[in-house]
Structure formats: C-alpha cells, structure tokens
Image: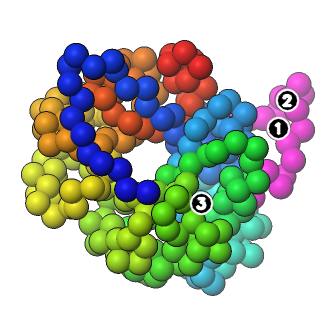
Amino acid sequence: MRRTPRIRRDSEPRIRPQVVAHRGSSHETPEHTLTAYERALDEGAEALECDVRLTADGHLVCVHDRDLRRTAATPGLVSTMNLAELDELDFASWKSPWAELDDEAPDRDPETGKVLTLRKLLEMVADYDRHVELAIETKHPTRYGGLVERRLVDTLDDFGWDGTGSPARIMSFSLNAMNRMRKLAPELDVVMLVEKAHHWPVLRPLVGDDWIIGPGIKELREHPGLGRHLVKAGREIHVWTVNTADDLEVCLDLGVTAVISDRPAYILELLGG
C-alpha cells in the first residue's frame, strides 16, 4: 500500500509509531531464529524485521552477515552453501555460550536454533491470530545481484502479498535493489535505508517521492539536521535500531511512523502498551 508523505505540525499530538522487532526479539534471544520471532509476537510487536540472503540452491534465509562466523561459528558463506548444509548448523548457541554449564538452564530444543527460511517466517505471520506486518531487508552486495529481489517477489506472490494490501514492505541500503523492487512489485512499499547522514543529499534526487526513508538512530542523534530535512520534505521515516528511552524520544519528536528495535517489549512499555 502506498503511503502519502506528510509533515507533522508542532501543534499536533505526537505520532505513536509502529513497533518493529529487529531480527525478532533479538536482545533476549538469538537473532533471526524462530524463537526470537515467536517471542516478539508474544511481547506484542506489531511488525517483524528480517534480513534475507539467497543460498546456493535458491532459498531465501533470514541471516544478516554474509559469513557465518558470528552466528554459527563457521567461516562458510551463506551464498555458497545449500539450505541442507545450513540446516546442520546451530544459529542459537552463540547467544548464550555458557548455557550448557548452567545446571538450572532449561533444555533448549535444537530445532529452534536452525536456520530460518523466509518462507517459514511468512507462514508464521500468515497463521498468526492478529495482523502483523513485515519489514524485509535484502542484503547487498551479493553474488546473486537482482536475483534476490526476484526470488523475494516470487515468494511473496505465493502468499498473495506482492501487491496492494500486502503486510510486507521491502528495505535495502542498495538504491539499485529498491529500483528493482519498484519494477517487480510497484504496489509494495519500499524503505530506502540511509547508513550515513551525508549520503542523503546524494540519494534525495534519486528516490521516489513516496519512498519511505530509513535512517539509523545514531545518525539522527549526531546529525540532527538530517531529521529536520526529512520532516521538512514530508518524508515518512522508519528508524533503526531504537533500544532506549532517549532513542525513542528522538523518534517521537520527529514524528516517525515506525521504530525498529531489538527490545520490542521495552519500547511498547515506554509507549504505554
């Protein structure tokens, strides 16, 4: 669904932003695991954020890093491995490396630490008993280039989510990726992520008027002019990664419409539930 950019006037009440779980409830649980997303939904998150990469045999998986050193203790690259190979790895133990030495720690189901496919995450959202949105980030650069977006649109099409009314929006730091998405699925919302404040003047003439802009909270803090320029231009703003009360205050002052957080329960508490 397309959103109409607007400017929030100082006299208006502050907007209550959508709370988006960043890689699930990833402050407490291993990122991008089914457990992290189930916990986020239990905590009341209104949307789920995930990163997607393409495996060597063409599956979209929810993994942030191009290699697996941090989250699966292996030097392998996601793009060179088949889904079956990834499925043999443990994507959860890194979060609590000493858990096996804790006699009081609950037993963990090894299935919850397996690699999560985007399809499985979409199935969970489709079956959930309330409306949940998705913020899906395509990671670039990658050896597969635009195939990532094409596979993503095909997967969303399987759920009937590639057009108007879709709960999904697509994000990337890659301008080329966002342009591809607009050609492949023109009715889907896109979020142009902005890594550095000084990138915005370059991007500004290149992005569509109805594109959502996604700056990081660090840049908004260190370069307050960025937020002022986005608000003055009437841009809808989604901010990552908002984890503290001070972070949230910056977002509320700007009138952002979505905050992406590792701590969705805490942010919801600050917002009053």
Tell whether 81 sits left or right of 205.
Answer: right
Q: Which residue is mark 2?
A: 105
Name the residue rendered at 89%, 38% in the picture. 107
Q: Is residue 158 above or below residue 219?
A: below
Highlighted magenta segment, given as a residue range: 95-114
Q: Which mark is residue 218?
A: none
Q: Which mark is residue 100?
A: 1
Does the magenta portion include 110? Answer: yes
Q: Position of residue 12 (x, y in %)?
A: 27, 20
When asked about the image quadrant of residue 104, the answer is: top right
Q: Position of residue 221 (x, y in %)?
A: 24, 28
Q: Position of residue 143 (x, y in %)?
A: 42, 80
* CA–CA distance in space, label 3 to label 2: 27 Å
Dot 3: what SS?
A: loop
Q: Is residue 138 visible?
A: yes
- Quarter of the picture containing the C terminus is top right
Does the magenta portion include 168? Answer: no
Q: Which mark is residue 62?
A: 3
Name the residue rendered at 68%, 52% in the picture. 125
For the residues bearing labels 3 and 2, Cβ distance under 8 angstroms = no
Q: Is residue 40 above or below residue 150?
A: above
Name the residue rendered at 55%, 30% in the picture. 263
Q: Nearer the viewer, residue 102 or 204?
A: 204
Q: Is label 3 or label 2 in front?
A: 3
Query: Mark 2 or mark 3, which is nearer the start of the sequence?
Result: 3
Q: Main secondary structure of the magenta part?
A: loop
Tell whether 207 sits left or right of 40.
Answer: left
For the residues bearing labels 2 and 1, Cβ distance under 8 angstroms = yes
